[in-house]
Amino acid sequence: MTESASVGNTAEHTSRDTSQVDVSAAHRHTLLTARGAADPGRIDDEVLLHRGLNDAEVSARTDTGLVNIQPEDSSRSLATILRTHILTLFNLVIFLCAVGIIILGRWLDLLFAIAGVANVVIGVVQEYSAKRKLDRIALLHQDAIMVRRNGEHTAINIADAVLDDVVYLRSGDQVPADGLVLASESLDIDESLITGEADPVYKPTDATVLSGTSVVSGNGYFRITGVGHDSHAARLTKRARKFTKAHSELRTALDKVASWITLALIPLIAVVAWGQIKALGGWQQMVEAGTFNSALVATIAGITTMIPQGLALMTTISFALAALTLGSKKVLIQEQPAVEILARVDTVCLDKTGTLTEGVMQFAHAKQLADADPGWRLVLGHIGADPNANNTAAALREPFPQLPELAQTDAIAFASERRWSAFAFGTVEDTQAPVGAWVLGAPESLIDALNVDEPTKTELHTRAEQLSSSGKRTMLLAHSTTPSNTASAKHPWFGEETALPAQLAPIAVVTFEEKVRGDARETLEYFQQQGVELKVISGDSPHTVAAVARQMGWDHPGSGYDARNLPDNIDDMATVMDEHSVFGRVSPDQKEQMVKALQHRDHVVAMTGDGVNDALAVKTADLGIAMGDASAATKAVSRMVLLDSKFSRLPNVLAEGRKVIANMERLAHLFLAKTTYAFLFVLVFSLMAWQYPALPRQMSTADFLFIGLASFILALMPNPRRYVAGFLSRALKFAIPSGIVLVAALWGINWYARVWAGDFSGVLPFESENPSAPLVMEQLQTATFITLTLTGLWLLNVISRPLNWQKVGMLVVLHIVFVLVLVVPLSQWYHHFVLPPTPIILAAVGIAALGAVGIEIIHRIHDARMGLAPDDPRPQG
């Protein structure tokens, strides 16, 4: 088996074995106490290595719960999803209003509650389907493991392993639990998913291994010392499992409006109730006439009209549709606001390994040092062709496809503590290239053993250091035709002690570099063009991280900042984060703190990651993005998963997010104008002691005509406008004046109708009570509906600009539907519509026209003051 050496700083990496899990008796006692289990008995390691556990010992551990049942962390729980969508102030207000209507038995007036229910259902269904998809993916990756039981190797499921089980590891295996190495044959472990270190760590006997890591080369046995929730990976991700709600500016704005309405409701309900009671003749008259229900329904109608439930529903629908669109592009949205958040992100923190790079090495260059060419290219071809080659050695396959004609006669497997591998071809009697012993390893491990003078050694050291400092993984290929002094029958070239052969001559310096994802450069350029700050954060060497940044065309990555020098103070750390873009030697806790430092400076931060070591930072970021091949824990706490691990998917997400935010801002102008007029409507009519001239069902239909259906269509329109903070402030500056115009129009038609009827008593008779009256309440309600809908349709016209044929067609259809609602008998019965006299109809239309003029003026003034119309796609400021 052949293996490559490590990068120039590997000596440091190897010495930093971070997998220090306490496997002492005290740790075992703590584990058992936490599980409430009795100690099934400690078995001698030599006995375990020979036979493993027997059936009785496995049963004893299973019965006491010492089983490696994995934490269910592949996705968010259903309870978390339900809590996010149901427990909101917005839903509470709608729920209380619905309860009031149900108690009164006015089921036909529950139309307003449909939007609230749909809002919850759509959000829960979309996020739960994402959860199910992640759960299915997690199941596909639960491979069997090989354990030693009853003296034999047995394949079992990960969840069936128990404390003290002896697990056999070989190249490519994932470590299923924490443990202690009992036997090692050049066992090298990749801990990058836990620590961020790119280089493998050698694990001799008595070393510890961690769940979630994987075997790079060699093989060995280890005893399980931590199972399930007690594993290092589970403890590391436990903090990341704490529920935090995604910050959505759209939903925050809705919650803010809901809180304002809630604060206003208590005094407003009192005013409305007083006004409606007075309008209906006072308490005594209400009791005698049985009109108490009408007063309460009118009060609820005013309250529900104030709630921008349509905006909440359209926000949820827009998020859900964006999630469906992105799902077809292999982007899984776990929390709906994730789409919006990326459009607001101004800083993206990128984990190097697995995000910017593919986690494998690629051949960079080979420089021949010797004058003669004794077949070194054939040797490199042989190294790459080895089926057990690690990803670095395998990178030699494509550039060196030739294979030597001579058979391999000796080999020494790579071990990270030795940091070289070796093999030989032919015998000392052969003359055909590439006969002899070949050694490939880290320069610092081989140079001192070379048969060259000191100046040459110094020159080689200097060259290797220069290449390593540039981020290249550097190796030296050396050759000898003289066997080792300790050569034996088993190892005719190297000897039993795996000693280097004598008379080694330097042949070539071979360099490798991390393979950058093919889409990374273009994607990073896109974000830079969009003004998004980029920070590369990695547990690897700062030089290596900076080299990767340069490979991607980064202009000034510098040499990278060593995170071991980061200050603890969050202000000082934030300053360092502002001054540097590339960071190496970053620990998992530091990643989290670095994200917090950026947020401390009011940055909206996205964090990409794939390893368990990224989970805390991914969870802390405003937008956590996990790669498709990330650990289950990291995917579970992220808000978005790139299923095919293609970084180039993010511009699609950004485009969808921009469309959602820009279109929701457009619709917010509409919905908040409705909230404003509804608030003033009930307030003005109550203070004037006029009966509220609308039923909840009538107001719901008016909302549907100039808000509901149109908002759905507008939400789907393309809108590339860049995100600009403060959309609620901008929306209110248009919505409040427009709402005042709407309520003025409604007051105008009610005032005119009462003047025409000569009745300012506050309450008008219903048709069934006095059909001969000049004006009955159903007619006034119909006139109010006409004025409100026509004025609202002009408001929709303004919001929809610039107009195109789709929008014009939409407006025409809505006007036709408006007429049908007024004249179709079934609609008249449902809405309690009675067409008023012609003068009232003409007045309703005329006042609506005046309202349209007022809204047009407000639109033009708002456009001029903002410097940009709400529908303008150009970026502001």
Image (tube, grey):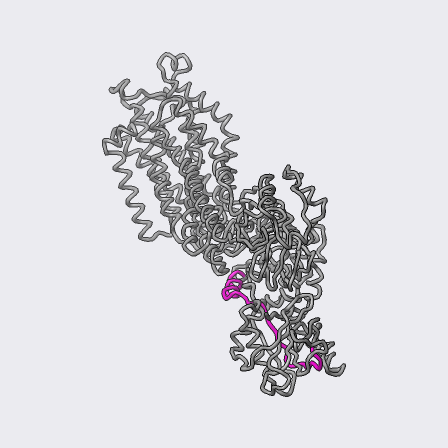
Q: Is residue 867 depicted above or below 283 in this figure?
A: below
Magenta stretch holds residue 519: yes
Is residue 740 at all visible to an observer of this figure? Answer: no
Question: Which residues are the magenta region?
Answer: 501-527
Choose between 480 and 330: the one closer to the eye: 480
Q: In this rendering, would 318 be left or right of 222?
A: left
Quarter of the image that includes the N terminus: bottom right
Magenta stretch holds residue 299: no
Is residue 453 at all visible to an observer of this figure? Answer: yes
**As drawn, which residue projects farthest toward the right?**
454
Choose between 432 and 566: the one closer to the eye: 432
Q: Could you tell me residue 181's position as x and y percent?
A: 66, 56
Q: In this rendering, would 485 be left or right of 432?
A: right
Q: Is residue 660 depicted above or below 781 in this figure?
A: below
Q: Could you tell me residue 875's position as x and y percent?
A: 49, 56
Choose between 561 and 328: the one closer to the eye: 328
Q: Is residue 849 depicted above or below 776 in this figure?
A: below
Q: Could you tell me residue 268's position as x and y percent?
A: 48, 26
Residue drawn at point x = 37 percent, y = 45 percent: 712
Q: Is residue 860 depicted above or below 119 in this figure?
A: below
Residue drawn at point x = 54 percent, y = 78 percent: 400
